[in-house]
Image: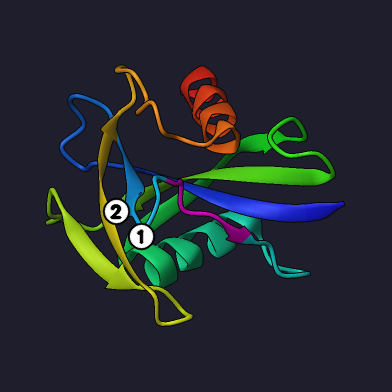
Amino acid sequence: MKSVVCPVALHPDGAPRRLAIATHPQIALVHSTLPQAARPENAAAQALFAVGGLETRAALLLGTSDNIVKAERWHFALCRTVPPVRDLWQNADPDGELRRFGWLALDGTAPDDIAQVYQRALDWIRGAL
């Protein structure tokens, strides 16, 4: 089974609860393959920085789910970001692709064009928080 890490990076102001998401080239949650022998919370913080450009002050494992993608175990880690953060930003991922990011209100409705995999992950995150 493949292991995936998903950083749950909430906006540091705390209200309303907002989650960092990629908005371009498609709406997506930041996620990455979990390297062998790595702690999920550390790998999530590294993925958040490498993909999203956000620095993590502290990370805490929230839990795991085998119900996001078939044959994958997703590890979710709450990542406390280092302020200040922007409302909108862009960052080049490790492959050099420029991605745009923003914040999604967790208590609101997800965008209509979000892929089902990310909707399932959002549902898991909402239930865990």
Q: Amino acid at mark 2?
A: Thr
Q: Give the residues drawn in magenta, as a range.
A: 28-32
Q: How many residues crowd around disc 1 within 10 Å: few (fewer than 14), some, or many (20 or more)?
A: many
Q: Residue at x 78, y 46 (%)?
A: 72
Q: Return the x and y of residue 47 as percentages of the image width and height.
A: 49, 65
Q: Which residue is mark 1?
A: 56
Q: Is residue 30 magenta?
A: yes
Q: How has the structure been colored for display?
A: rainbow
Query: x, y percentage for residue 80?
Result: 34, 49
Q: Is residue 29 left or right of residue 72?
A: left
- Residue shown at 53% from the left, 18% from the top: 127
Majority secondary structure of magenta residues: loop
Type of amino acid at the residue the image marks with label 1? Thr
Label 2 CA crowd tier, 10 Å (few <14, some 14–19, many 20+): many
User: Residue at the spot x=46%, y=23% of the render?
Assistant: 129
Nearer the observer, 75 or 119:
119
Residue 112 lies in quadrant: top left
Dot 1: element: strand
Element under disc 2: strand
Q: In the drawing, what numbered circle is on residue 14?
A: none
Q: Are marks 2 and 1 in contact (CB under 8 Å)?
A: yes
Would residue 30 be found to the left or right of residue 101 on screen?
right
Residue 69 lies in quadrant: top right
Alpha carbon of mark 2 to alpha carbon of mark 1: how far?
A: 4 Å
State whether residue 114 is above or below residue 52: above
Q: Is residue 53 left or right of residue 127?
A: left
- Mark before the other along the chain sequence, 2 or 1: 1
Image location of residue 18, percent across then percent down = 27, 33
Q: Is residue 84 above or below residue 19?
A: below
Q: Is residue 47 magenta-colored?
A: no
- Which residue is identified by label 2? 81
